[in-house]
Amino acid sequence: MSRVFPYPLLIVSLIVMWLLLTGFSLGQFIVGTVVALVAAQGMAALHPAKSRIRRWSLLPKLVAIVLYDIVRSNIAVA
């Protein structure tokens, strides 16, 4: 099962995003499913390393830094 669906969360999220961007119909669902399956097989071929969060306490700091960078960039563009 894992060879056919190596990243099930990726497949589901790609199908949902495809349908949100193109509209809900049977044809778009089939095309989105095919695209998601091909993308998941491509990711499996790359063999990405499994990520683990070792220090959960640093996660709020990372989120704060990212939000600060977003606000600073928006101010610079404006």
Image (spheres, rainbow, N blue to C red):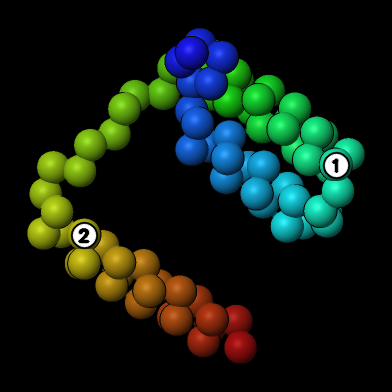
Q: Indicate left or right for 73 with 63 as reference.
A: right
75 lies above or below 42: below
18 lies above or below 76: above
Compute the Cα span from label 2 to label 1.
Answer: 40 Å
Residue 78 drawn at (x, y percent):
61, 88
Q: Residues within 10 Å of mark 2 (few under 14, many from 20)?
A: few
Q: Please tell me which residue is depicted at 58% across the width and 25% down the height of the picture.
A: 40
Residue 3 drawn at (x, y percent):
51, 11
The one nearer the camera, 43 or 12, is 12
Q: Which residue is mark 1?
A: 26
Q: Along the polypeptide, which appears first: circle 2 or circle 1?
A: 1
Residue type, numbered disc 2? Leu
Q: Please tell me which residue is depicted at 73% across the width and 47% down the height of the picture.
A: 18
Say which mark, if any, is on residue 60: none
Q: Please tell me which residue is depicted at 78% across the width and 40% down the height of the picture.
A: 29
Q: Indicate left or right for 23 with 42 as reference.
A: right
Q: Residues within 10 Å of mark 1 (few under 14, many from 20)?
A: few
Q: Is residue 46 visible?
A: no
Q: Please tell me which residue is depicted at 77% across the width and 56% down the height of the picture.
A: 21
Q: Indicate left or right for 66 with 2 as reference.
A: left
Residue 57 drawn at (x, y percent):
11, 59
The one nearer the camera, 69 or 32, is 32
Find numbered disc 2 in the image and state the secondary structure of the residue it sits on. Answer: helix
Residue 8 drawn at (x, y percent):
50, 31
Q: Nearer the viewer, mark 2 or mark 1?
A: 1
Q: Is residue 54 visible?
A: yes
48 lies above or below 63: above
Residue type, numbered disc 1? Leu
Q: Residue furthest front?
A: 26
Q: Indicate left or right for 12 with 24 as reference.
A: left
Q: Which residue is mark 2?
A: 59
